[in-house]
Image (cartoon, grey):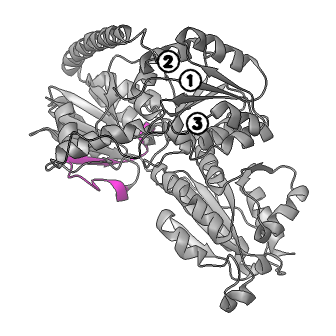
Amino acid sequence: MRGRQVFMDSLAAHGVERIFGNPGTTESPLLDSLQSYPQIEYVVALHEGIAAGAASFYAQASGKIGVVNLHVAPGLGNAIGMMYGALKANSPMVVTAGQQDTRMRLRGPVLGYDLVAMAEPVTKWSVQVETADEIATIMQRAFKIANEAPAGPVFVSLPINVMEQDTEIAAMASAQVFDSPRPDPAGIAVMAEKIMAAQNPTIVVSDDVARARAHDDLVALTEAMGASVWFEGIRHHAAFPNRHPNAKAILPMDADAIRHTLGEADLVMLIGGPFFEEVWFTPGTPFPGGAAVLQVEETAGRMSHNHTVDAGLVGHLPTSLAALAKALNAARGYQVAAKARNEALASESEAATAAYQARSQRAWDRDPMSMARAMAELRVGTPDGTVVVEEAITAGLDLAQAFEFAAPGDYLSGRGGGIGQGLAGAIGAKVAQPDRPLLAVSGDGSAMYSIQALWSAAHHDLDIVFVILVNREYRILKHNLDTYRQRFDANSNQDYPQMNLDTPALDFVTMAKGMGMPGTVVSDPGQLAGAVKAAFAASGPHLISVNIEGKR
């Protein structure tokens, strides 16, 4: 058999249903084999970054491995940014790229380069297949490493001549491995004792809870502790229901601000990890002085990786959280105090919601449209059960106020801080959850990083409503420049250089039309909900360009 057959059989043996890719000449063996494997769909992208971003969100939304097919050195280079995001998100992915014929290695062939070295910094494992006899073993190992906690992308370089070599070594599937550790009962006892000694506990939750489907277990533990719950500054999932009265907001992006936000907490429980992703340096730790720090993590390697903890528990997250909740619920005296804290948190939540609504009303009739009004109208037009893929950035807080994210899968965003993941990710999320409506919300600057995703949505006739928030600027950069000037005592009375997107104006409806997608422009907030309803009612993808306010 040929190496390409072993490769395709390896995908089939691992249950792969889709390949996300941008085709090229060195990928001819794979492309020419697709007709013999009708159970595997090829999701076409016009840029390799779109393929990698879509595969990462597909992996997160489906719980299955994402497979990517790239084109030699420039194609891999185009995908590196999205692969970095996938690494930060712990997305299990097998990324492949066709490589030039190895017999030309010393001739410096066109498009040739050391693909393994290029991919290595943003993958868990990077390797080139040197003979067809290696394909079965390398593919089996690639799937194994990609799925091992913490999950992440691996890279396999596939020289075109190796794919056409003969071999007698057939494809093999990775064994089903049950590797979720049970939590140590002694560790449960120590953790429970420290929790019960606290008067003001708080929890910081990571995406690991959503990926482990420990959502309900976290809710039970939160209520048993009487704890508030904070989210990471950059997150991929809604790991805790944002309408729960114990839910707070996202944490800021420097240690001092995190410490200030956590306030009077005397115990901080980190669930998952590692924590925290910071933008600005500040001295000290992110924890309030004197607070006990606990961590529950599924892998020992990430335990106490960035911060010293007073107690750590390695174990399967659903089992660990359930065991902790059980131990706390058994302490009747403790539950009296926990109930009182839960009631206080509910009152705080009501007050915070009322304060937000009052602020929103003050901005309700602004022209251009305020972000709060835009998100509220957007929610009115969006059907229940919709998956929201969000890259709204500076509108993200208003979006979180407008929408309810009750369970894993309701919300997806990008990790790592690289922009452009939203539109690409919407492709993968919709393919993963075809039966649910999908809303993709992106800023205009972010959208231009992956605008080619609109073509893929139209080409595959995906029912996605894309909403582009047009404020004609890199608003987040303006905020960050303000912070930079303040922190480093730089000039503070200057304009914002190279951060406006108004000359020339970006016409997203025309761009969408050029890629086969209808579009609508909305400037009047009273028309937004109706436009969104109409877009969801129609078949196929639709783009809505919403003119909103810029930085004030």
x then y, percent, for residue 465: 66, 27
Looking at the rendered structure, the secondary structure element under dot 1 is strand
Looking at the rendered structure, the secondary structure element under dot 2 is helix
| Snapshot quadrant of residue 270 | top left
> Is residue 423 placed above or below 549 in the rendered structure?
below
Distance between the alpha carbons at the discs numbered 1 and 3: 12 Å
Looking at the rendered structure, the kind of residue marked 3 is Leu
Which residue in the protein does label 2 denote?
374
Distance between the alpha carbons at the discs numbered 2 and 1: 8 Å
Q: Residues within 10 Å of mark 2 (few under 14, many from 20)?
A: many
Q: In the rendered image, is residue 396 in sight?
A: no
In this picture, residue 38 sits left or right of residue 456: right
Between 232 and 344, which is closer to the camera in this rendering? Answer: 232
Residue that sits furthest to the left in the current view: 290
Disc number lying in front (3 or 2) = 3
Which residue in the protein does label 1 denote?
546
